[in-house]
């Protein structure tokens, strides 16, 4: 049975820190056996089921999530539900910054840009985690832009933008698998 409407409350005294972790996690969709996603409407029996993934993703043998470093204070996630009236969905976005000049990083970004699809997990400051990408609507590395900065200030490195079409932000509360699946 579909869930019913309920009160929407504020933080009720809970902390609400901004920002994302220094590391996010990613894997190509081809590495998964099962990519978990929230229940669709009207199938969700609770409001949380429509926006949260509680089950673990299932990887193919030897596959796992990979760490992706981001300079502190230079990363952020967002969701913009841009669908027209009588339509659903929008884009979840992730902005990251990788410092330095490293040919391995540039090669990995080039490979990720060519990838058919990705899944990103994004730890937030309060321990909650966002998921970008599901099976039929994977995350895509939209662009990456390298810059040297100037002699007087700034830091050289690469800005990275990831985008995924989603119905809403997805909260992931499963396990982040960082060791290869058996």
Image: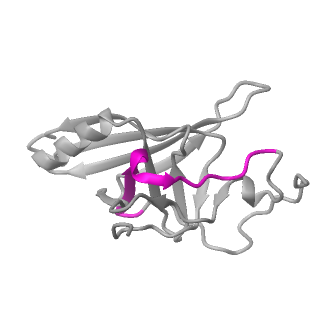
**Of residues 180 and 111, the one drawn nearer to the viewer in this rendering:** 180
Q: Is 67 placed left or right of 11 in the picture?
A: left
- Quadrant occupied by the N terminus: bottom right
Q: Is 136 placed left or right of 61 in the picture?
A: right
Residue that sits furthest to the left in the current view: 151
The residue segment tinted magenta is 21-41
Residue 132: horizontal and vertical position, in percent?
51, 48
Q: Is residue 67 magenta?
A: no
Quarter holding residue 141: top left
Q: Is residue 101 visible?
A: no
Relative to 78, residue 122 above or below: below
Quarter holding residue 149: top left
Residue 136: horizontal and vertical position, in percent?
56, 38
Residue 78: horizontal and vertical position, in percent?
53, 46
Determine the residue positioned at 31% across, 56% down. Answer: 70
Determine the residue positioned at 52% across, 60% down. Answer: 57
Q: Is 36 placed left or right of 66 in the picture?
A: right
Numbered circles on residues, count: 0
Q: How is the image coloured?
A: one colour
Q: Is residue 35 magenta?
A: yes
Residue that sits furthest to the bottom in the current view: 13
Residue 111: horizontal and vertical position, in percent?
25, 39
- Quadrant occupied by the C terminus: bottom left
**Of residues 151 and 10, the one drawn nearer to the viewer in this rendering:** 10
Determine the residue positioned at 18% across, 37% down. Answer: 147
Quarter holding residue 14: bottom right
Q: Is residue 149 visible?
A: yes
**Of residues 53 and 157, the one drawn nearer to the viewer in this rendering:** 53
């Amino acid at each position: 049975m579909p869930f019913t409407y309920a009160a929407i409350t504020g933080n009720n005294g809970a902390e609400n820190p901004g920002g994302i972790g220094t590391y996010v996690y990613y894997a190509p969709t081809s590495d998964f056996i099962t990519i978990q996603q929230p229940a669709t409407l009207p199938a969700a029996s609770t409001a949380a089921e429509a926006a949260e993934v509680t089950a673990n993703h299932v990887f193919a043998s030897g596959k796992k999530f990979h760490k992706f470093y981001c300079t502190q204070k230079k990363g952020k996630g967002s969701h913009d539900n841009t669908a027209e009236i009588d339509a659903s969905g929008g884009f979840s976005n992730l902005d990251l910054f990788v410092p330095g000049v490293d040919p391995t990083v540039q090669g990995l970004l080039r490979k990720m840009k060519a990838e058919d699809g990705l899944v990103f997990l994004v730890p937030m400051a309060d321990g909650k985690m966002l998921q970008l990408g599901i099976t039929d609507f994977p995350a895509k590395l939209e662009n990456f832009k390298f810059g040297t900065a100037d002699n007087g200030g700034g830091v050289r490195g690469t800005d990275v933008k990831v985008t995924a079409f989603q119905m809403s932000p997805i909260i992931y509360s499963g396990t982040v698998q960082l060791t290869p699946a058996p």
